[in-house]
Image: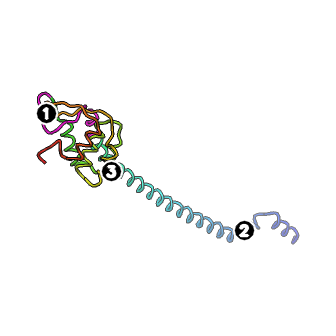
Amino acid sequence: MLARTQHALEVGSPISNLCGSRSTQRSATSRARQRDRERERERVGMKNFVGVLCLILFCSVASAEGQNVESRVIDLAMNRLVKVKSISNYDPGFGTENEFYKLSQEFLKTHHSSDFRRMVNQRNPIVRAMGLLCLTQTNRDESLFVLLSHWNDAEEIYLHQGCIVSRLTVGEFVQRLFLNAHFLDPST
């Protein structure tokens, strides 16, 4: 009979299950608790990670939107400037507009010298002339080298001074700016 009991315990009879059930249940319960704690840590870590990503995304979108507002203002003024066909002074004259002069006053109020330096390197001669004019009127010392670099610019532009229209090169416009930065507006 003793041999049968030992054999039953070795084979895995219900008696052997009863003998080890408490320790097995305790270890299974502790393993389950440990797994639950690890899952909870992972959830909390994931929530923090998602929160940080949302914060970064919000900040980058907000800063990009702020930059976009300023660039729209620049683009609108630049779009109007690209449509201008000639340089003009304060006096519109008969049947002409002084859009270049009006835009120069707007650019001087709303833009920085770094914008004017970028304009000086544009292909459009009217945009280059606007950049040279505004840079000269905002910072005379800084504009000296820029003016000298465009001294021989051979691109032709038209200058409206009241009813008189004259053709000159960007280099000649630079030479006039060199002598008087406000030659388009004698009141200043």
Q: Which mark is residue 18?
A: 2
All told, the count of numbered labels is 3
| Residue occupying the far top of the picture | 95
Between the residue at mark 1 and the residue at mark 3, the CA separation in whole angstroms equals 31 Å
Q: Residues within 10 Å of mark 2 (few under 14, many from 20)?
A: few
Amino acid type assigned to the residue bearing label 3 in the image: Phe
Q: Residues within 10 Å of mark 1 (few under 14, many from 20)?
A: some
Question: What residue sits right under mark 1 in the picture?
Answer: 162
Residue 80: x and y, percent? 25, 36
**Which image quarter: residue 31?**
bottom right
**Which image quarter: residue 106?**
top left
Residue 160: x and y, percent? 18, 33
Amino acid type assigned to the residue bearing label 1 in the image: Gly
Give the mark nearer the N terminus: 1 vs 3. Answer: 3
Q: Which mark is residue 145?
A: 3
What residue is at 39 percent from the left and 52 percent from the top?
Answer: 60
163 relative position to 148: left or right: left
Q: Nearer the viewer, mark 1 or mark 3?
A: 3
Q: Look at the image and name its color scheme.
A: rainbow
Region of the chain picked out in magenta, as a range: 77-95
Residue 151: x and y, percent? 31, 43
Helix, strand or loop status at disc 2: helix
Give the mark nearer the N terminus: 2 vs 1. Answer: 2
Q: Residues within 10 Å of mark 3 (few under 14, many from 20)?
A: few
In the image, residue 78 lies in the stretch drawn in magenta: yes
**Which image quarter: residue 82?**
top left
Nearest to the observer: residue 59 or residue 25 = 59
What residue is at 65 percent from the left and 66 percent from the top?
Answer: 28
